[in-house]
Amino acid sequence: MGGKLFNAKRMTKDEYNYVTSVVATWLYGHCEFVLPDNLSDKKDFGDLDVIINSAEFEKFCSSVKDDSYVKIIERKGHSFYLEVDEIDKFRVQVDFIVSNNLQYAKWYYSYGDFNNLLGKIANQYDCKLKDDGLYYRYNATNDIFLTDETDLIEHVFDIDLEFNMTKIGLF
């Protein structure tokens, strides 16, 4: 959402890295989570995305508390508006992506718009690339799950995301 839900100020790359480390420390021990790899050369960020285990999200929401580094200002759905660092009172939007498969979701959300493009290619083969795996479009109302193995998906579409990101200078 780019921080627009709470009108959060955009973060520089250094601020983003700092907020990421503080929020990860805050979350550690409360729930199972991963952070998407930030592979872009973006200069600023509107929010922080955190992928959290779907079975733990509601429990996390009801049990998580403020601490000396993070204060919860507001919550809307899966997004939290946090005050990070009581000295600077830096406010940031954290968007929680709820998933049953953290490693697949990390792969899916780590390459920016690349997986949107890969999804368009999959559509040409009556497949759908979703945030929980690759599906075959059986008919207008039914999709058949094929796989959530990222190596297999890359093989099927003859791509190597790590190589491609390195080659174009994003890795």
Image: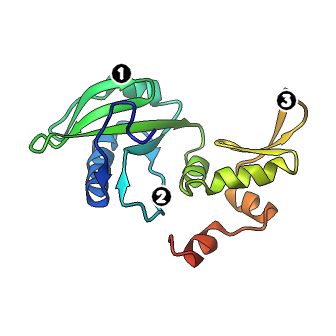
The quadrant where residue 156 appears: bottom right
Q: Determine the residue positioned at 57% across, 75% down.
A: 168
Residue count near mark 1 (Cα–Cα under 10 Å), binned few <14, some 14–19, many ≥20 = few
Mark 2 element type: loop
Residue 149 horizontal/vertical position (percent):
70, 54
138 horizontally vs 34: left or right = right
Marks 3/1: CA–CA distance: 35 Å
Give the labeled residue for mark 2. 37
Front label number (2 vs 1): 2
Q: How many marks?
A: 3
Residue 69 horizontal/vertical position (percent):
18, 41
Q: Determine the residue positioned at 26% across, 48% down.
A: 22
Task: Say above or below: 160 vs 122.
Answer: below
Q: Kindly identify the amino acid type of the residue bearing the numbered disc 2.
A: Asp
Query: Furthest-left residue in view?
Result: 87
Give the labeled residue for mark 3. 142
The reply to whether dot 3 and dot 1 touch (C-beta < 8 Å) is: no
Give the labeled residue for mark 1. 62
Among the two numbered marks 2 and 1 on one chain, the one whose residue lies closer to the N terminus: 2
Task: Say above or below: 19 vs 82.
Answer: below
- Which residue is nearer to you in this view: 93 or 8? 8
Mark 3 element type: loop
Q: Determine the residue positioned at 75% across, 50% down.
A: 120
The reply to whether dot 2 and dot 1 touch (C-beta < 8 Å) is: no
Q: Kindly identify the amino acid type of the residue bearing the numbered disc 3.
A: Asn
Residue 68 horizontal/vertical position (percent):
14, 38
Q: Kindly identify the amino acid type of the residue bearing the numbered disc 1.
A: Ser
Mark 1 element type: helix
Residue count near mark 2 (Cα–Cα under 10 Å), binned few <14, some 14–19, many ≥20 = some
The quadrant where residue 88 appears: top left
Query: Furthest-right residue in view?
Result: 139
